[in-house]
Image (spheres, grey):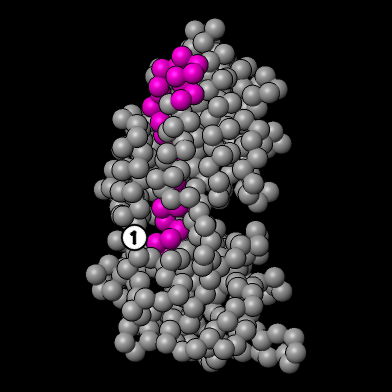
């Protein structure tokens, strides 16, 4: 049985005959009873299908391409292993994310290291592991990387991260490609040229290409086209110094629908916009067509994730608002509080009931801003009911905290009616594991 908000849930979702939400063949209420709540689940079929969609969309348009997953959206060993099985590389931004890749024996040559302030130890770990690419973000890093590569006697391939000063029309906190950004070398100030020339002069740095990232989530394709044009023009100018761009990455930031009827470009539409802009721009400028690297994160794992909560207290303020409190909140998903992010939510245990009450779903953390979803229509709620939030697979659990000393939720992977834990729920001992007794 289909349901109204199916477009924001994994494609395996449906409703059972007794009115329960089912994802990956698993009854949500049974998962909640078995594993407890809050609980995050990933639909394995959805994950793998999205990986294959990206490979097909870009591979059908450009022979020399690579899809690498932006690990910051969410990573752990099980996720990294699945992505490698599907033929993706990894984009990492910390020593911790490198450690996850190493733990599953991910091929280091298929990993790109990002970040605006990589530490010496992180870079040493990356180089000793044999990382494929370092995306250089500033002159300090360029100098440090050359020092470390020289000490090892092995040149390191890098991409120079530039800022093309293109506004992607997304939240200010997630805009990264404008002039006023902590990331990258601006083109218009001459700093991008300086960085590339320094990289060319460094003995153990091999600048193979350019990278930019505009922000996330980006609901249009036009900003990518503008930024690609500016980047290619910059690459063309750099030919006078004898440099040729062999690799190019327009980053990621591809949007997903968080709420019903929210229009976003399809994977094919993103691919068509990026590849066509790259090919036409190279033809116009007489550039050789470089290898294309794209970095989806949210758009791969976001739609595959669902967060489950149990209802506790219900507070009605006549004429004002009705609050339905759940056992999670900003500790496991800070995006509504941090970005004003908007989500759908459904009564997973009452999918066949009429939605007659307007309520606000509040978290249990000690902040008035701990609200997951405002003013949503749901059936009458009571303690013990199970609620499900779709599109929760990216930047929720990965940004989770132990605020109020709350253990972070478990994560399960579901497929064909079976569920397996890929991250256990934290316990109180975990919260004190790094503490001194007194």
Query: Could you say which is closer to the camera, residue 351 or residue 326?
Result: 351
* Residue 10, horizontal then vertical, whole percent: 38, 65
Residue 142 position by quadrant: top right
Q: What residue is shown at x 44% (from left), y 45% (from top)?
A: 269
**Residue 325 showing in the rendered view:** no
Q: What residue is shown at x 44% (from left), y 81% (from top)?
A: 348
* Residue 245, horizontal then vertical, whole percent: 46, 19
Q: What residue is shown at x 31% (from left), y 30% (from top)?
A: 63
Query: In the displayed structure, would residue 287 be above or below residue 136?
Result: above
Query: Could you say which is closer to the camera, residue 184 or residue 302?
Result: 302
Q: How many residues crowd around disc 1 within 10 Å: few (fewer than 14), some, or many (20 or more)?
A: many
Looking at the image, residue 138 sits to the left or right of residue 66; the answer is right
Query: In the displayed structure, would residue 162 be above or below residue 365?
Result: above
Looking at the image, residue 327 sits to the left or right of residue 410; the answer is right
Query: In the displayed structure, would residue 89 be above or below residue 307?
Result: above
Query: In the displayed structure, would residue 307 be above or below residue 393?
Result: below
The quadrant the N terminus occupies is: bottom left
* Residue 48, horizontal then vertical, whole percent: 30, 54
Q: What residue is shown at x 42% (from left), y 56% (from top)?
A: 301
**Residue 6 showing in the rendered view:** yes
Q: Is mark 1 on a helix, strand or loop?
A: helix
Decide whether residue 251 is among the magenta residues.
no
The part of the chain drawn in magenta is 280-307
Q: Mark 1 points at which residue?
A: 46
Query: Could you say which is closer to the camera, residue 273 or residue 376?
Result: 273
* Residue 335, horizontal then vertical, whole percent: 60, 61
Looking at the image, residue 345 sits to the left or right of residue 30; the answer is right
Decide whether residue 288 is among the magenta residues.
yes
């Amino acid at each position: 049985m289909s349901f109204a908000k199916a477009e924001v849930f994994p494609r395996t979702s449906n409703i059972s005959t007794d009115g329960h939400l089912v994802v990956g063949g698993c009854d949500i209420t049974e998962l909640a009873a078995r594993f407890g709540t809050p609980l995050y689940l990933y639909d394995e079929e959805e994950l793998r299908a999205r990986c294959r969609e990206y490979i097909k969309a870009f591979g059908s348009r450009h022979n020399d391409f690579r899809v690498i997953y932006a690990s910051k959206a969410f990573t752990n060993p099980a996720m990294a292993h699945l992505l490698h099985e599907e033929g993706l590389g990894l984009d990492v931004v910390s020593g911790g994310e490198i450690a996850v890749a190493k733990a599953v024996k991910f091929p280091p040559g298929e990993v790109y290291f990002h970040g605006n302030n990589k530490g010496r130890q992180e870079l040493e770990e990356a180089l000793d592991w044999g990382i494929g690419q370092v995306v250089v973000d500033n002159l300090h890093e360029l100098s440090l990387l050359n020092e470390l590569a020289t000490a090892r006697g092995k040149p390191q391939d890098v991409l120079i991260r530039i800022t093309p000063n293109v506004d992607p029309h997304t939240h200010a906190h997630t805009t990264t490609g404008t002039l006023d950004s902590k990331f990258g070398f601006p083109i218009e100030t001459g700093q991008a040229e300086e960085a590339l020339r320094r990289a060319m002069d460094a003995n153990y740095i091999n600048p193979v290409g350019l990278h930019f990232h505009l922000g996330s989530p980006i609901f249009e394709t036009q900003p990518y086209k503008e930024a690609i044009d500016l980047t290619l023009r910059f690459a063309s100018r750099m030919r006078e110094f004898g440099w040729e761009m062999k690799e190019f990455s327009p980053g990621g930031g591809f949007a997903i629908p968080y709420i019903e009827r929210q229009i976003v470009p399809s994977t094919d539409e993103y691919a068509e916009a990026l590849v066509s802009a790259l090919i036409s721009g190279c033809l116009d400028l007489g550039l050789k067509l470089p290898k294309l690297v794209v970095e989806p994160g949210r758009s791969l794992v976001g739609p595959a994730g669902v967060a489950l909560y149990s209802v506790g207290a219900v507070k009605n303020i006549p004429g004002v608002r009705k609050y339905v409190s759940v056992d999670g909140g900003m500790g496991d998903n800070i995006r509504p509080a941090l970005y004003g992010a908007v989500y759908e939510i459904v009564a997973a245990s009452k999918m066949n009931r009429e939605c007659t009450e307007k309520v606000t779903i509040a978290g249990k953390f000690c902040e008035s801003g701990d609200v997951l979803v405002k003013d949503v229509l749901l059936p009458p709620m009571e303690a013990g009911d199970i609620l499900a939030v779709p599109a929760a697979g990216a930047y929720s659990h990965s940004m989770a905290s132990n605020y109020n000393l709350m253990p972070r939720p478990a994560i399960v992977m579901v497929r064909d009616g079976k569920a397996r834990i890929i991250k256990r729920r934290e316990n109180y001992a975990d919260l004190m594991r790094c503490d001194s007794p007194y």
